[in-house]
Image (tube, helix red, strand yellow):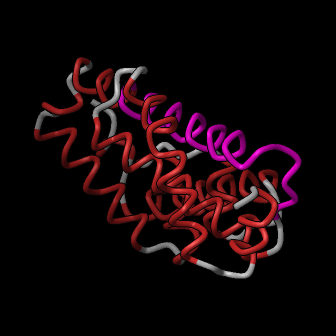
Amino acid sequence: MKEAELFERIKKGDEDALEVIYKKYYRMMTKLVLSNNGTEEEAKDIYQEALLVFWQKSVSGKLVLTSKISTYIYSICLNLWRKELERKKRHSYEEKDGVQHMDLEAKEKARIVLGCIDQLGDTCKKVLMYYYYDGLSMQDIAEKLGFANTNTAKTKKYKCKKKLDEVVKTQYSKSDFVD
């Protein structure tokens, strides 16, 4: 079966065609992760996530394929794996920095801030949690929350942070946070 035919079938929601793609490129895509300090399980997860992105964009009609399917999926895998490596690096750095062993005072401060975030609207909660706790980029936040673009996400984060500051200031004094 030719690539163009496979792609047309996938655009129409044909899961059998996606299965063909899955099997055809499995080794190539997982090798990318395995050869870049990843495990078999991580490779499988990245490949499945990449195929999901490919599937969703294809079925939605938003994908205009200008390269081979394998090239497109490979680029998705590469981007996903880079993000995962960054996340791991950040997590490793935090552990070395002692974030894993926060003292009771720091945990109390974090609890206070999280409590104040809970008082914000749902969108603000999501924006701040995605940004500060999950470490997502503005682009990822815009996509997750359906914002028009990254500038909208940045503006929303700014406004939500301002609201959070107001909530904290009305409920707590500066001495609650400064040693």
Q: Who is closer to the viewer here, 102 or 170?
A: 102
- Classify 11 as above or below 172: below
The majority secondary structure of the magenta stretch comes to helix
Question: Would you say residue 88 sits in the magenta stretch?
Answer: yes
In this rendering, is residue 91 above or below 138?
A: above
Left or right: 151, with 41 as reference point: right
Q: Position of residue 65 (x, y in %)?
A: 84, 54
Q: The N terminus is located in which quarter?
A: bottom right
Q: Residue at x 44, y 37 (%)?
A: 84
In the displayed orientation, state which residue is furthest to the front: 1
The quadrant of the rendering that contains the C terminus is: top left
Q: Is residue 39 above or below residue 109?
A: above
Q: Is 94 left, or right, of 21 in this rendering?
A: left
Q: Which residue occupies the foreground of this view, 125 or 6?
A: 6
Q: In this image, 118 relative to 105: left or right?
A: right
Front residue (pair 117, 61): 61
**Which residue is depicted at the point 48% across and 29% down?**
32
Residue 40 point in image, percent of width and height: 29, 37
- Taking depth in this image into account, of 22 and 131 the one nearest to the observer is 22
Q: Can you give x and y, in whole percent of width and height, for residue 31 in the image?
A: 44, 30
* 76 left or right, relative to 152: left
Q: Residue at x 34, y 29 (%)?
A: 38
Q: Position of residue 75 (x, y in %)?
A: 66, 38
Residue in view at x 48 percent, y 43 percent? 135
Look at the image and give the residue range highlighted in magenta. Answer: 63-89
* Tag count: 0
Magenta residue check for 15: no
